[in-house]
Amino acid sequence: MKRLLSTLQSAGKTWFAEDAPNWVFACKTSAAGLLALWISFRLDFSQPQWALMTAFIVARKESGLVMTKSFYRILGTTAGCGMSLLLAAWFSQSAELFLLTLALWIGLCVGLAARYRNFQSYGFMLAGYTAAIVGFGAAASPTHAFDIAQSRVSEVVVGILCAGVVAEAFFPIHASTRLIPDAIARFQRFTDFMTHTFSLEMDSGRMQEVQQDFLTDIVASETQRSSSFLESPDARLRDARLRWMNASFMKISSTFHGFIQAMRRFRSQASVDTTTIVTRHYQQLLNCIHGQDQNPNRVAAGLAAYRNNLAQQRAQVEALLLTIDDVTERREVDAALGLYFRVVEELSDYADAVSALSASPAGKPPAIPDFAVHADSWIAILSGLRAVVVLFVLSAFWIATAWPGGNGAAILGAVFCILFGAAPSPVTVVKRVALGFALGQVMAFVCMFVVLPSTDGFESMALGMLPFLIFSAWLIENKRFSTEGSGVFLSFITALAPHNQMSFDIVSFLNDGIGTFIGLGAAGVAFSIMPASASRLRSRLLTRLGQQAGQACLAPLSNGKLRHHFESRTRDLLYQLSTAPANTVANHSGTAGDVIGHAMSILEMGQIVIEMRLALANMSQTTMLKKPMNRLMQTIAALCEHPGDALRVQVVEALHQLDIALDNLITSNDADAARKNQLQLGRYQIRAILRDDDWFRLVRSTRFQSDAVDAIEGVGHAA
């Protein structure tokens, strides 16, 4: 009996933790949809089902996501309606010209949707398929075009308002409440990672896993930040601090990786006594991290105190360096210590950012540029072309056959191409959505021809529809059936099409259902005939990843914004490589570990050259350094983009020319002397990297599997 009670109790806890929130969401969404439908009936809208459907489309568990998605839905709907009015006014007298210009507009919107992310992408989708939905009706009846567009916008706004009010009034969930706990948890994971790495307790495989988590976590954090921006005034006040925190985390994670790699190379060559000059500082840093129970506020205070003593430690280190007779070894120790001190400074900045995030918003954080993402132009063009082709083919079939449901099939075919074009496996998604559509058609048939004829008034109609709506909303939020659920609710609401004066016409119902499946089938055929090749996408992403080092070497510094753009875009590329469809390529050259290592190698080299370029840009005496620096940047960019041993030698030669220029440079002030030291630190790091065959292997292995990895004999020694 006790075992049975324990089992029931455990099952109850699991249900309340996992499934109960889905049922609450389903009830809230259904209530919002029925409220929107009632208001549409009272206002006598021409298509009240759009208010009901909008409430379902923008519904999310988190109220902030509802507001953000609603904002972009209004923008997209308004833009789409505006374009449909223009097209109807210009080309309603010619079906061919109207279809051509509408197809071009849809193609443009789909392409832009593929280039943007999150709800910005959704806004462009709306602008495309709203123009299709409203445009056909407006072109068929130009004198009522404005009324059609106005009705569409009004219905959407009503659905949005109802969804927002219900989401915030009943059991609200705010995504912004997770921002600070997630940030603190990531800070603690990173400090744990530093501790294990300093103590050499983490193997290379586990280190790569942790690094991938940190690299991709940035993208998720940026998505969460942008999604919760409209949720509350507090979220908007903290937005600048979230940007600062993410930017500082990217900097410290790249610098720390570079330091660990530099120490790995340094340990393999230096003596134990020389290595100790650097490693004896570790414990002081670890005391600052773990001596305060990893509380960000206390860690930030401890690191600030430690950072203030760095000048004194630098003086002590300089005295120790004089005891090293070998000039090359002395410079390598100096470079390793310089990297360590940079780790301390950037870790202190990161702790300050996390601490400021958890404090009451006061003061002004540093200005941080927008997170830079990579959007593949090939995917954008293919997505737009696919939607255009489907619209043309189905429209031609409609015009040739004069089929009454042909315009609906053409619209839905284009809409499905827009909605599912960004899916990792669109053909699979279309198949699953088709199952949902079939179930939705059955549910709509039962509701329309069995349940609703027995109802009288809105109250009984709402009660008749309620079980079907709740089930549809539950499917949407259920992770296992969410794809099918989207098809169920779209099909059910579209086929049911509730109006003040219902028409129970089974012939029209079947005709519209056939048009729906023809449009869905056309989209599936288009995805099969014009697939977005995962192998080609992966190859393009890897090429762009290799080009990031070239951007770090040659792109404008943009007043110091280059490093942030470089860091964020590189992480975004890795995120795309580690998610579908790019990571689904079978038997592709390079393992997942190679891709992570490749990205980390690019980050390591990129942050070195950017710091060198910033140091040179801020020096007052640059005449004799510009030419060798430009030559070095050009050769490094070429090496990272097209790895080869000949280019490796050219980088060594360019480094030698920079060495001569730096040795002959006489600084006139302390600031220039510090920047000269930074340039020297960078050249030692690059030289150490060139001697590292593991780095060279990672840079070339993911793209050139067939190439031999062995270095030309003598290149490592020359470096």
Image (cartoon, helix red, strand yellow):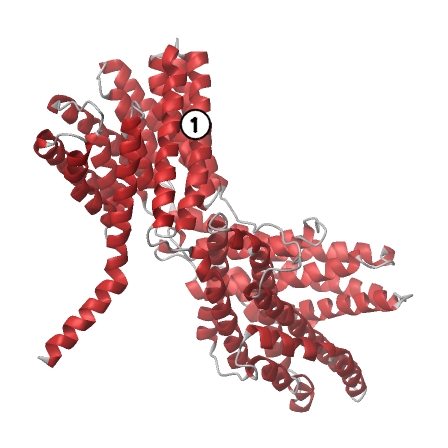
Task: List x then y, in percent, for residue 501.
Answer: 19, 22
Q: Could you say which quadrant of the image residue 400 lies in?
A: top left
Q: In the rendered view, would you say 719 is above or below 85?
A: below
Q: Label 1 belongs to which residue? A: 80
Q: In the rendered view, would you say 353 is above or below 231?
A: below
> Which residue extends farthest top?
93
Q: Is residue 429 left or right of residue 693?
A: left
Residue 105 seen in this snapshot: yes
Q: Is residue 130 left or right of residue 474?
A: right
Task: List x then y, in percent, for residue 653.
Answer: 74, 62
Residue placed at 49% from the left, 83% from the top?
A: 201
Give the quarter of the figure containing the N terminus: bottom left
| Most foreground residue, 662 or 705 | 662
Residue placed at 46% from the left, 57% from the top?
A: 176
Mark 1, Cα crowd under 10 Å, few <14 / some 14-19 / many 20+, is: many
| Most foreground residue, 203 or 281 | 281
Q: In the rendered view, would you say 331 is above or below 352?
A: below
Q: In the rendered view, would you say 335 is above or below 672?
A: below
